[in-house]
Structure formats: C-alpha cells, structure tokens
C-alpha cells in the first residue's frame, strides 16, 4: 500500500468518519523526525488542520511535508496564494465566463439575490450548477474544503475563496465531504492485486478525441503491457484529472503538447509535485518554440536549415528574404506542430500575403530555405541516447510529411524504420547532441541529410510512437525502454 496519511489537529476531529490507520495528529507528524524515512515511496499527505494561517500548526504541517518531499494537499503555494485575495482574484479571469453562466442559472427564478456562497469538497459540490466552476477552482487551488462566494455588481464575480476547517461542517456537509474524500483518495488507497508487485504508479495523459495523437490506441496498449511487466501501475488520465497527479509517481504525456493548453499545466504541476515527467515543462517550452531552438542550435554550432526570423513585411525585409533564399521558401509560425502553421510560398505576392497573415498571429515568423528531399530522418532519443530511427516520406503529391488539406485517405506519407547501425553515424551524433542541450527526456529529432550534412529541421518533445511504425525494429523492447527510463529516474531521485 502507498504511504498515505490524513492530518488532523485532534483524533476527535475525525469522529464522524470511519476509523483509519492513516489518521495522524499534526503534532505527531511534526515532531516525529523519523516519519516517512523508512519508505522510499513518496508519501501523500492530506492536511485537514483547522487553520492554515501563516505559522499555524496547519501551515507548518504543509511546510514540513514539502521539506520531507511528501506530496501534500494543500501545498504551501496554495496556502500562500489563498492568503492574498487581491492576487488570487487577479488570476481568475479564465473562469469568469463559467462564473457568470452558473450564477445566472442559479438566480434566474429569484429577485434581488446579489450574493451566492457554496462549498467545494476536493473539487466537488452539492449543486450541479456549480460543478464545472468547482472543478476549475480546485484545479487552481487544491485544498480539501473551500468556500466560494460570488457577488453581483456590474456582473457576477468571485468575491472570495476561503479554506474551511473540517469542524465547521454540519452533518449533511460531513456526508458530502466523506464521499468526496473517498472518491478523491480511491486510487491512493488502492491495494495492488494479488500477484502484482507494483512499485511505481504512472499517469498517462491522453485525449481520446485527438485526430493526430502521438501514440495510437495499439501503441498505448503496448506501453501499458510493458509497464505492467516492469512493475509499473499505469492509468490513463484526461485533462480533467489535474488534481489527481499527486496520486502518481510519474506522468507520461501522450497528447500533443503546447504551452497554450492543459498539457503544459499538467507537466508543470507534476514537476512541482515531484513526479518523474515526460514531457517535462522545460522541454515543452524549448521544443515548441522555434525561436528558442534556432538560437540554441546556432550558439552550439549544430547544422540546421538555412533560416531567418523576421518581424515585419516591409520592402527591405522582403528583398532580403528573396536574396537569401529565392523561391520557393517556407514560412513557419514559431510554436506550430505537426506541420500546422507552415506554408510554402512560390513568389513575391504569396510571400506578402502569407507573411502578413502570420505576423497577425506571431510577432516573429521563421523563414527557411526550401530544400526538397524525398524523406526526412526522425531519430528518437531517450535520456541522451538514440532509441529508434525512421525515414518519414513526404505525403503523396505534397511537399510535407503531413498534408492537412486532405479530406480523405492518409494525411501522412509512408515511413521506413531502420536499425540504428543502418543510420549514418553523423546523423545519430547530431540528433543526440541537440537533445542533450534540451534535456534528458524523450525527443524526436527531424533532420534532412543533404550532401553528407545532417541539417536539423526541428526537435519534438512529444514524438510519435505508433505501432508498426517507430516500433518495427525494437518491437516491445521500445516500450520497455521507456518504462525503464521512468524507473531509473525515479530511483535516482529517491536514493536513500
């Protein structure tokens, strides 16, 4: 069973619920210097102290938990955020639409109601109208019990978010709290099935609706099978499971990453919780921005496609691009992925139109010389070493690997997977060198090999691993190696 404890001020604070071996008083936890030192597993702590005020017993409990590398809810960051009303209200703009919709529905049959208060228990509340708002608030401020107050002035807005002590609940609220805690901690309290010896719990973030996911269903099942064989319990999670991250030891992101959506938030939260993360937030930040990667490779003398960044489309800039590259040339929005936000222009008129459009979306646009090849190399790199090698051929009748204009048939071109010893060594060396500059995770390096020179096209922090493509040479061992990377990193970070 996982190391998991619930902290209260006094044992009697828990009398409304079933007795639990996981229950500890805060003082016992604070003064037992040996607590948790016998286990190499991360300990999960739910802090239910009556007060979280600065330098209170509740505050010290969360603080000490973090100093012991325990995963605690609420964290010190959450407590500090909730103690500064002006700051946390400033960060709630993204839930404003949800606030207004819920409040309007709640008050549609009432007159003169200007204030609404409701309580949230581990992201759940009694009134279904506030279900989505409760979830989003809990995602931002993970705290066992919160009271949210809405007020109507010009519009409905959040007036306050306050932590509420367990002792403040009435009998009905105690029942709802108990059910919410049970739902929240189900996985934490999970006992491994007999015959299974899980020693690492891994969350796999997926989006079942994604059109071009980095791993198809068959490969996800192979990952799960390989992980199980290594003693790794794995479970697929979705964008709604941000607050469940502290149930796990690691996070494996298998949906397309960008800093603009929840994938980056998951990666960042997982790292803050002390999980082993692929893709880690630093890798996402670096790889998803072509401006950063261009400069990184330029400084470290890694060959890449001839490129320039521009910030305007005036006559001098257009003339410089024509002299540098000629036609055709390729325009890219710096944070695009899967060939989205990439256009080829064949003349000055097209250059003016596309560049003007791209500059409305991004302050900088990457311009690259068009160097056509039959295929691009993709080298998968894991923890600084080559993992697999593929040739990705251009989509039939198209100049890119992906043809997003197609409405039927295969969007992507054919592929060929090779053993690493069949790949020119200089390609492997270039791929591993650039990955080591980025981080120590899982990457896919796209290169063109022209006249014996490997030119990096881009580095993907979230590379495709699909059945019968990237795994054709290694087979099940590819999935096993990814699992071993999680275990190795975990053991390194939890050495006694």
Image (cartoon, rainbow, N blue to C red):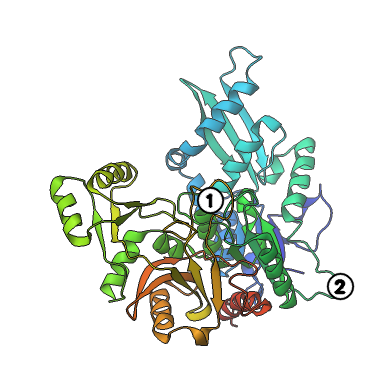
Q: CA distance from mark 2 to mark 1?
A: 35 Å
Horizontal side of residue 4 vs 266, given as left or right: right
Q: How many marks?
A: 2
| Residue 220, label in figure | none
Task: Tell which residue pokes out farthest to the left in this image.
Answer: 316
Residue 199 lies, with reference to residue 149, above or below; the image says below
Q: Residue at x 67, y 69 (%)?
A: 223
**Residue 279 image position (x, y, % from top left):** 52, 65
Q: Is residue 197 visible?
A: yes
Which residue is denoted by mark 2 in the rendering? Answer: 194
**Residue 299 image position (x, y, % from top left):** 26, 73
**Residue 143 image position (x, y, % from top left):** 61, 49
Nearer to us in this view, 373 or 493: 373
Q: Is residue 54 visible?
A: no
Quadrant for the N terminus in the image: bottom right
Nearer to us in this view, 426 or 173: 426
Rate crowding at label 2 as few (under 14), some (14 to 19) or many (20 or more) other CA atoms within 10 Å. Answer: few
Rate crowding at label 1 as few (under 14), some (14 to 19) or many (20 or more) other CA atoms within 10 Å. Answer: some
Q: Name which quarter of the figure residue 220 lies in.
A: bottom right
Q: Name which quarter of the figure residue 213 lies in.
A: bottom right
Horizontal side of residue 25 vs 424, given as left or right: right
Horizontal side of residue 449 vs 26, given as left or right: left
Nearer to us in this view, 285 or 322: 322
Nearer to us in this view, 228 or 214: 214
SS for dot 1: helix
SS for dot 2: loop
Horizontal side of residue 366 vs 255, given as left or right: left
Which residue is denoted by mark 1 in the rendering? Answer: 262
């Amino acid at each position: 069973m996982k190391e998991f404890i619930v902290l209260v001020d006094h044992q009697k604070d828990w009398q409304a619920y079933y007795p639990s071996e996981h229950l500890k008083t805060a003082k016992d936890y604070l003064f037992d210097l040996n607590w948790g030192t016998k286990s190499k597993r991360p300990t999960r702590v739910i802090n239910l102290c009556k007060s979280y005020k600065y330098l209170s017993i509740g505050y010290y409990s969360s603080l000490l938990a973090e100093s012991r590398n325990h995963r605690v809810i609420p964290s010190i960051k959450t407590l500090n955020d909730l103690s500064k009303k002006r700051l946390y209200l400033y960060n709630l703009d993204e839930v404003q639409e949800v606030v207004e919709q819920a409040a309007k529905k709640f008050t549609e049959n009432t007159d003169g109601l200007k204030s609404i208060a409701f309580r949230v228990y581990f992201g759940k509340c009694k009134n279904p109208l506030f279900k989505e708002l409760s979830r989003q608030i809990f995602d931002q401020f993970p705290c066992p019990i919160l009271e949210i107050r809405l007020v109507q002035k010009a519009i409905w807005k959040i007036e306050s978010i306050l932590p509420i002590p367990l002792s403040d609940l009435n009998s009905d609220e105690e029942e709802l709290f108990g059910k919410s805690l049970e739902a929240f901690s189900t996985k934490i309290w999970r006992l491994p099935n007999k015959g299974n010896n899980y020693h690492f719990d891994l969350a796999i973030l997926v989006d079942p609706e994604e059109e071009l996911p980095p791993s198809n269903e068959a490969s996800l099942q192979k990952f799960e099978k390989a992980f199980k064989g290594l003693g790794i319990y794995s479970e697929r999670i979705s964008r709604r499971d941000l607050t469940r991250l502290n149930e796990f030891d690691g996070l494996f992101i298998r949906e397309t990453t960008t800093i603009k959506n929840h994938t980056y938030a998951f990666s960042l939260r997982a790292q803050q919780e002390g999980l082993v993360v692929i893709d880690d937030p630093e890798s996402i930040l670096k790889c998803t921005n072509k401006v950063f990667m261009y400069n990184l490779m330029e400084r470290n003398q890694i060959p890449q496609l001839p490129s320039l960044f521009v910030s305007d489309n005036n006559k001098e800039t257009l003339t410089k691009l024509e002299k540098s590259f000629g036609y055709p040339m390729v325009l890219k929005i710096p944070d695009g992925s899967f060939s989205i936000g990439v256009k080829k222009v064949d003349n000055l008129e097209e250059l003016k139109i596309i560049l003007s459009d791209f500059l409305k979306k991004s302050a900088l646009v990457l311009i690259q010389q068009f160097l056509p090849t039959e295929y691009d190399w993709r080298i998968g790199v894991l923890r600084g070493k080559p993992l697999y090698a593929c040739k990705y051929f251009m989509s039939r009748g198209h100049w890119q690997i992906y043809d997003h204009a197609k409405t039927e048939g295969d969007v992507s071109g054919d592929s060929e997977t090779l053993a690493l010893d069949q790949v020119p060594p200089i390609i492997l060396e270039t791929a591993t060198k650039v990955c080591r500059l980025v981080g120590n995770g899982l990457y896919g390096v796209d290169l063109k090999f022209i006249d014996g020179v490997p030119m990096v096209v881009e580095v993907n922090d979230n590379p495709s691993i699909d059945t019968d493509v990237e795994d054709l040479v290694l087979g099940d061992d590819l999935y096993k190696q990814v699992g071993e990377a999680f275990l190795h990193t975990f053991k390194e970070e939890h050495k006694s």
